[in-house]
Image (tube, coloured by chain):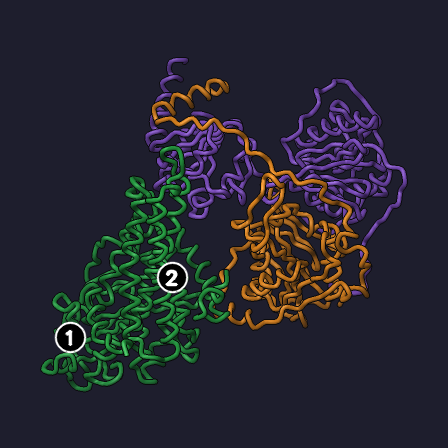
Chain colours: A purple, B orange, C green
Amino acid sequence: MSISPSKAGTVDNMGVETREGIMVIADIENGILHRSTLELLGKARELADSRKTSVSVALAGNNVGELKQVLFEHGADRVYIMDCEELGTFDPATYKEAYISIIKEAKPEVILISATHRGRSIAPRIAAHLATGLTADCTDLYFDEKGNFIQVRPAYAGNIYAHILSRTKPAMSTVRPGIFKPIQRIPGRTGEAVVMPKTLCPRGVLRTISKTHRETASITEAKVIITVGRGLRRKEDIELVKKLARIIGASVGATRPLVDMGWMPKENQVGYSGNIVKPRIYIGLGVSGSPMHVIGMKDSEIIVSVNKDPNAPIVNISDYAIIGDLYEFIEKLTKEIERLKSKIS
Amino acid sequence: MQKNQIAAGCEYVNFRIVVLMKPTPDPDKVRFDAEKGTIIREGVELIINPYDLPAIELAVQVKEKLGGEVIVISMAPPQGEEALRDAIARGADRAILLTDRRFAGADTLATSYALASAIRKLGNVNLVIGGEKSIDGDTAQVPGEVAEMLGLPHVSYVSRLIDIDYSRAIVESDLESEVVTYEVPLPCVLQVTLNVAKPRIPTIKGKLQARKAIVEKWSADALADIADINRFGIKGSPTMVYRVVIPKEKERKRIILDTEQGVKAVVDLLMKEGLL
Amino acid sequence: MKLRNYYPYFEDFHEDIKSLAKNVSQELEKRAREADEKGSEEIMRENLKMLAEHGFLGINVPEQYGGQGLDERSVVLSLEEIARGCAATAFSLGGHYLAVGSILIGGDEALKQKFLPRLVKDSIGAFALTEPNAGSDAASIVTRAEKKNGYYVLRGEKHFITNGSIADVFVVFAKTSPEKGARGITAFVVERGIPGLLIGKKEEKLGVRASPTNQVFLDDVEVPAENIIGKVDEGFKIAMQALTRGRIGMAAQAIGISRLALQLAINYAENRVQFGQPIINQQAIQFMLSDMFIMLRASEELTYKAAWLADRKADVTLEAAVAKLYATEAAKLIVDKSLQIHGGIGYTRDQVIERLYRDVRILTIAEGTSEIQRLVIFRNIKRPLD
């Protein structure tokens, strides 16, 4: 019932000499492949080609065998399949067991996992089990001239990028979704499917009591985000912003003070302790641009800000800094868009 | 103790909750030297990693419900002592600082190994709670690695503790596209998000008592009987920082417009993007 | 930077008090603007509740009554930080401390046992001395207290009472012996809910708007003799001593506001570019900032010294008056200069400096106007010139 001092640690030092190939651990969401799996496959393909080696995918779950076709068509040479009923429950420990079996079989040099919540739950267990290096939330990966595998990742809330070298193999990385691109799909491409024996199916201790689906598309996927800050005078005024967002087809974000005051839910928070977003267009209304917020949106492709204060920090990082009253801006923009839409229809 | 010996209302001799805490630089005070590619840390004091505050708060709440003790453990240089003292002010009963030159230069694997070893040394731990990530390392790996090293079940991204007793916990885990409610047996490791508990500000009394409290300091030798000290610190770290790059901020156009011009510019942008 | 390294007046534990007050202040700051805009009593109640939970209501009340048993320096550091986050909350807290202080100074054991635990835990105090015709001339109050069958019947009208509408415990000063003037005043503790105690309209103020300021009517309020603080006819002394103590707290509030105003001015001047460079490069601005800095430092020295002396149980009548006068007058100047540096935008509601400008103005008036402070100082001037 409790940890006793004599219990040995679980360190699995495989001491395997030869390791090669890039392995991607498939991230499965609601029975289908999460988009990041294909992104990782694309990068794995690039890395493998530069090393003249192969790409494999570890596909574990419940009733997931059919997904192998998509994986082949997106660059996988080999897909290891661990199909177990027990994996119907997402338990990081059991998924680790499943992947360890596959890794022992495949002996990859590099293992890539999506930095989704699922991936980031499983990866540490695998790494600890193998006593190997794991680098989190990587935004770039490459082999240098000496053949070292280098993983690039942000630290200090994105203020620095660290280039990390792993001295052990396999080198493991969790990779940030939305950074890499899948290869162009090759219809009909096929590869080798390796089905792992059911005797290896793991048993877990976590029990799922219930699951609640989250409908709202995460703000991190939005192309246009309108973020509102303390320039907004009243909670009720959020409706004006939501209306504008609806007609543009944008998502609505909020700075931390608004979330703290309960004006918007936490899912909509843009900033270091909320969501880090990289939309095509970011429009900040009444957002001053405090450092913690800026961390969350500074990589937006185009930044537009609306603020009464010409000295607000956000002005400095805007492509278009509109100095004016945000209410006037919302009203005029809404009117203009409605006018254009009625002309078209 | 057999599971069937734990019945409701039967009080544990000592329900032990360990909180993994990292003393981190105050994020508002850290500066970066873009030219040298360095992080300017001198003079910046270490505070409790903001993501660990809800972990400490949750531990204290569990203790208030089930009794027992909250032990906060950190692996840090000696300056980390103040942060541990702050943890005591916030309700921890014991604070242990793992500090030794041999722990230095540790990556997450070596850090997790040291922390797991300390937990094993303590013994009889029923629950381990860790924060989502640290504001300087940002890896979110330590609680999972500690769980694996201790052979314990774990749940990450715990956004709510629904219920807990001596044998199991019911938790909600935020898996982005869904929220899953689990029952997890104890002992286990929980990695919690900021939402899980609102950290209370210490009272004056708490702060003053913490000033008098003793922060236990364990060196690598303290763990030598149950751990392999070659797995601590830089020796036990498979990953190392090759290079640090402080990115140049993207060049922005900084075109200043008034409201009229602004509306026009935004409409143009949206049209170019095919959104209108 | 450790307090002690710069100011030898403090102990190590004062560091903790300051950092705690800072944490609390950051919470207060979040709603300070809303509280000011709405003049929100509700937010003030919540703020004071939070302060109570952390021990600030009873910070200088001895532990045997449930307080923290801390010193004047701790009060100063707390009020500084709280004023920085929300000046209105600090102002209300100051009013509460005057009531608590009166009981601590003059109350017998029974009275202390009766009221202090409540005032520490969740009851707000109010100090009711001022009347429409008795402000600086406090001795000329006309509220009457007549003895009747073991009770004292209070009748009169108080105004500008801080915390009027949220207080549970009122320290009321009334004339038991009108013919004796100042020496005929008695201090009573009157509880909310007592028949005849009526809280009147809330004043719409220029600043510290979230701190409720009310008229208080005493319509034949019956107060038991055991609620007298100290002895009959000795209330004026208690009032003066409480106000002397409170002066150091006022100076602390002024320091908190000054420090913020200076910081805001520096931040603004570093970012505002005119004529091709940040205005902080202009000598005119630099000179203003230096002057502000000197005034702030001087305020700190006078206030911390006074608090240190108070903690050594010295008579701080002179030092408290000097600190209050200087720090509050300086705060007005510092805030004014800061607003000037902000320029046009400093004049808009969006900016914190606008609120500070309004909040700071009460400090040279409340708890003894600057003019009264000068009288007190003059009366004691001969002492240190020896």
Question: Residue at image x 28%, y 79%?
Answer: C386
Does C34 sit above or below residue C103? above
Q: Which residue is mark 2?
A: C80
Q: Is residue C194 visible?
A: yes
- Left or right of residue A101: residue C157: left
Residue at 36% of width from left, 47% of height from top?
C286
Image coords of residue C297 (percent x, y): 37, 60
The answer for which chain carries disc 1 is C
Looking at the image, is B165 positioned above or below residue A255? below
Q: Quadrant of residue C93?
A: bottom left
Badge 1 amino acid:
Ala
Q: Is residue B224 left or right of residue A246?
A: right
Q: Which amino acid type is shown beneath numbered disc 2?
A: Glu
**Left of C275 or right of it: where is B31?**
right
Q: Is residue B116 visible?
A: no
Q: Position of residue C90 (x, y in %)?
A: 34, 61
Chain letter of disc 2?
Answer: C
- Considering every residue shown, the one lying at the far left of the view is C179
Report which residue position mark 1 lands on.
C139
SS at badge 1: helix
The N terminus of chain A sits in image quarter: bottom right
Q: Are marks 2 and 1 on the same chain?
A: yes
